[in-house]
Amino acid sequence: MTRTFAEAPSPVSPAPLTAARVPGLAAGATLLGSGGGGEVATGALLLSRELAGAPVPLLPAAALAPDTLVVHAGLVGAPDVLAERLADPDDFADAVRTAAEVVGGSAGAVGVIEIGGLNAVVAAVAAARLGLPLVDGDLMGRAFPRIDQTVAAVAGVDPAPLVLVGPGGNTVVVRQCSRRLAERLLRANVLALGGAAALAVHPLPAARLAAIGVRGSVSACLGLGDRLLTAREAGGTPEGLADALGAELLAAGRVEELAPRQDLAPGWATLTDGRTGAVVRVDLLDEYLAVTVDGVTRAAAPQIIAAVDPSGRRPLRADQLRTGGHLILLRLPSLHAWPAEAEPLVGPTAFGLDLAPPTVPVAGPVAGSPGGRS
């Protein structure tokens, strides 16, 4: 049976984000990265320091005044550059202010671009530095590699203005860009800024965000992370971990073969399920894209696939898989019900995979999930 997150009431405001809640946020964001989203630990340290002075209010988009301008903040760049040089918090603040100025307003709240990986933490850093609330929601419901793989893109909303702030305050402002060109423009300018930059994008009125955004995903991330941390302390079986996270256990075993990605062509890993003897294949790029068990598709993007080290109960990124390593494969509850027409954007075909539909539909959660709209 597929598990889903319990629906969060809206627009009731959850508890503020404090330094004590950062470990849970980081753990949940790593799981929701679905194997990608970058290294979260350095961002978590930065956020803990930012929250030492004051907590950040966490508010649903529907709880804000309808005309409140929400600017979405994040960090983009090559993983190796991001691991060595995390952007200055002032860069995020400057990016948000600049994006708001371009549309002739001032930011009243900060939004999360993707709740999976580093950007779940970085948006909170921006909110803390600016002294603004963080919206309890995001635009992806997990991590995706491209800026056009958002619920906003599905709703026909272009990302512009797009603002990048690099080292030394060097700033790029793209006042207008289509969804089709946004990723290419982003990558070219990030390269010119040294391989990593703070990003502000999608300045939206709260009323519009409430209509199209993923609802309650920051709260869901915090809850998921807290459950992972508790399960890590308790130990137990793969089945127990899946139950603790409300997830479906797909497989648990040893990695037998590992084929790296070739540019944009997915790589793959194979393992033998130690419980059943089934042959399991995991297709991957930056994120885990699909899991097939004895040739049957059991999970596929945009569903959230997580790999966890069975000894330390720590989520494993796709670039951390190693031949001979053991892992637990899980399908996490979906945060968002993607419509069927979004499949070419966020489904397996978006990554060059031709798969039979998974045993649970790619569209997303069943009744009871917070997924859908903010």
Image (cartoon, rainbow, N blue to C red):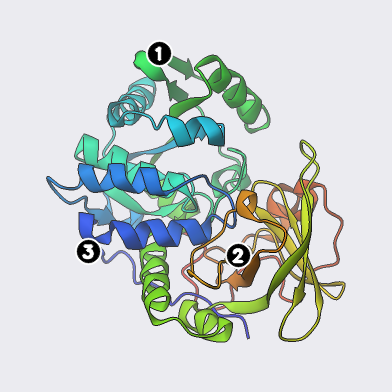
- Identified by mark 2, the residue type is Ala
The residue sitting at the left extreme is 53
Q: Which residue is mark 2?
A: 307
- Disc 3 versus disc 1: distance between alpha carbons? 36 Å
**SS under mark 3:** loop
The residue sitting at the front extreme is 324
Name the residue nearer the viewer: 278 or 162. 278
Q: Nearer the viewer, mark 3 or mark 2?
A: 2
**SS under mark 1:** loop
Q: Residues within 10 Å of mark 3 (few under 14, many from 20)?
A: few
**SS under mark 2:** strand
- Disc 3 versus disc 2: distance between alpha carbons? 29 Å
Q: In the figure, 122 relative to 30: above or below? A: above
- Identified by mark 3, the residue type is Ala
Provide residue 336's location: percent of width, then percent of height. Answer: 55, 63
User: Looking at the image, which residue is at 81% across and 79% down?
Assistant: 278
For the N terminus, the quadrant is bottom right
Q: Nearer the viewer, mark 3 or mark 1?
A: 1
Which circle's residue, 3 or 1, is located before the other in the chain? 3
| For the residues bearing labels 3 and 1, Cβ distance under 8 angstroms | no
Q: Nearer the viewer, mark 2 or mark 1?
A: 2
Q: Residues within 10 Å of mark 2 (few under 14, many from 20)?
A: many
Q: Which residue is mark 3?
A: 15
Name the residue nearer the viewer: 217 or 322. 322
User: Looking at the image, which residue is at 70% across and 66% down?
Assistant: 362
| For the residues bearing labels 2 and 1, Cβ distance under 8 angstroms | no
Q: Residues within 10 Å of mark 1 (few under 14, many from 20)?
A: few
Q: Which residue is mark 1?
A: 170
- Disc 2 versus disc 1: distance between alpha carbons? 38 Å
Q: In the figure, 350 relative to 105: above or below? A: below
Which circle's residue, 2 or 1, is located before the other in the chain? 1
